[in-house]
Image (cartoon, grey):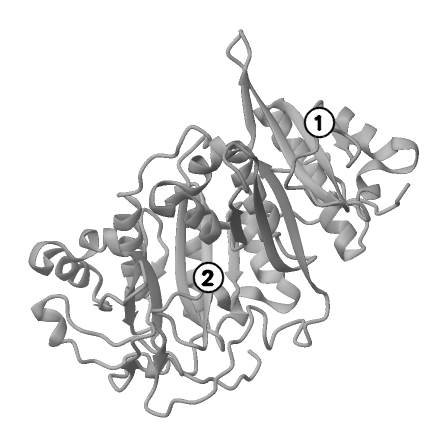
Amino acid sequence: MADQNIDYGKRYSHQPDYPDEAKESHGIGPQDTVYRYLCPSRKIGSIIGRGGEIVKQLRAETNAKIRISENVPGCEERVVIIYSSSEQTNSCGDTDDLVSPAQDALFKVHDRVIAEEAPGDEFDDVQQVVVRMLVPSDQIGCVIGKGGQVVQTIRNETHAQIRILSSDYLPNCALSSDELLQISGDPTVVRNALYQLASRLHDNPSRSQHLLLSSSSLHRASGGYMGPNPGPFSLMGPYAGYRNDSGDGVREFSLRFVCPAENIGAVIGKGGAIIKQIRQESGAFVTVHSSAAEGDDCLITVSAKELFEDASPTIDAAMRLQPRCSEKFEKDSGVLILTTRLLVPSSRIGCLIGKGGSIISEMRNLTKANIRILNIENENLPKVASEDEQMVQITGEINVASNALLQVTTRLRANVFEMDMPDMTRHDNRDGNFRGSGSHVVS
């Protein structure tokens, strides 16, 4: 792994949740296996149990050390630190594979947390789960691999969405040198990916992991963390030290959706739960702009800084938003029709039209969706549109509209990166691996 200067400027302090934890003073050795699993605070009871009985049982069953951080102001997750010697002594499920006690405990903790997941909503075919872990910056390279080869191989083999989110998404319970690793998909897919990622982390321990149980850290009221020698620190990007160190190739890709005012509640959710989940699961910034007057359309902006060869957080968030921000019409047959509206700068609209309308015709034929482009002279253009924008309107059944949105957004993304359009005849709008975009020929 590449050398990096590690600055543990942000730390979380630890207080025991139950009496036996205070007795656990064993430090972390340089060759130990260590995991930091982020558990939603509302589910922490599934790991601790009444009087700490569940965590005692997990320790006894696995021979791993398990520590749970205290609640951190402004943070909806708690860090579960799991560690043990690296010796592979424990059996893994029904297989003959042996894993370290920490790996065994990680899977058991994960299974207990996921068991409390609520079933998916009407827009999800199967239950979707999300796992988040903190990984030191000097260790994340073993997960990414040279040119992203390792993480892409795991994505391909497991079909899980695997992301290393930007430092903007680091929770308050993280250290300044941490990276945020996120896995999402259906339960079986996520567990398979977790197994592969945990194995990589087991084989490549962090050089600074012995500092993780330090009790000298101080908590700041602002929600940040500072060590005994506070000072400036570097927030390393997700691929610092491994590729694109200079930042070359990074572009901001954004989309602007027009959303009926009555749909905003379905986008935001009670207490902001839905929009917060979309942000966390996609890794994109999602902002809802209030309408100027009651009944007017609202504007939703989705954006992220991206590398072309990586999965697109912006497109992922767009696909999750579509069934919530689109106009809906139910036919007499009961079939639901969606109309999705997207504002696009006039300077980029050519990549969707093509010479003589060739590209838009191709997208219509491929997806069977009704795709229209409206300009400022059209009376149907919403008030939230700017003078230099045109509106792409996609209409069709849910799957049809979804495929069409993927086509449109992928082409817009390639236009931003000035790349050619990949083969879009095979795709999956749930795997997160949106890799291409359209030819940017402007008519």
Would residue 160 be found to the left or right of residue 344 on screen? left
Q: Are marks 1 and 2 in contact (CB under 8 Å)?
A: no
Secondary element at image label 2: strand
Q: Picture coordinates of residue 128 (x, y %)?
A: 42, 40
Q: Earlier in the sequence, mark 1 or mark 2?
A: 2
Q: Judge whether 366 appears above or below 342 on screen.
A: above
Q: Picture coordinates of residue 3 (x, y %)?
A: 55, 84
Q: Judge whether 353 appears above or below 174 on screen.
A: above
Residue 64 in which image quadrant: bottom left
**Front residue of 140 and 352:** 352
Q: In percent of the image, x 77 and y 32: which residue is there?
A: 373
**Front residue of 29 and 394:** 394
Give me the disc on residue 367: 1
Count of numbered circles on the image:
2
Q: In percent of the image, x 91 and y 41: which residue is there?
A: 443
* Distance in Å between CA atoms under marks 1 and 2: 34 Å
Q: Which residue is mark 2?
A: 181
- The kind of residue tagged 1 is Thr
Q: In percent of the image, x 46 and y 61: which residue is there?
A: 181
Q: Picture coordinates of residue 43 (x, y %)?
A: 24, 51
Would residue 224 be found to the left or right of residue 154 on screen? left
Give me the disc on residue 185: none
Determine crowd level at label 1: few under 14, some 14-19, many 20+ residues with C-alpha closer than 10 A.
many
Secondary element at image label 1: helix
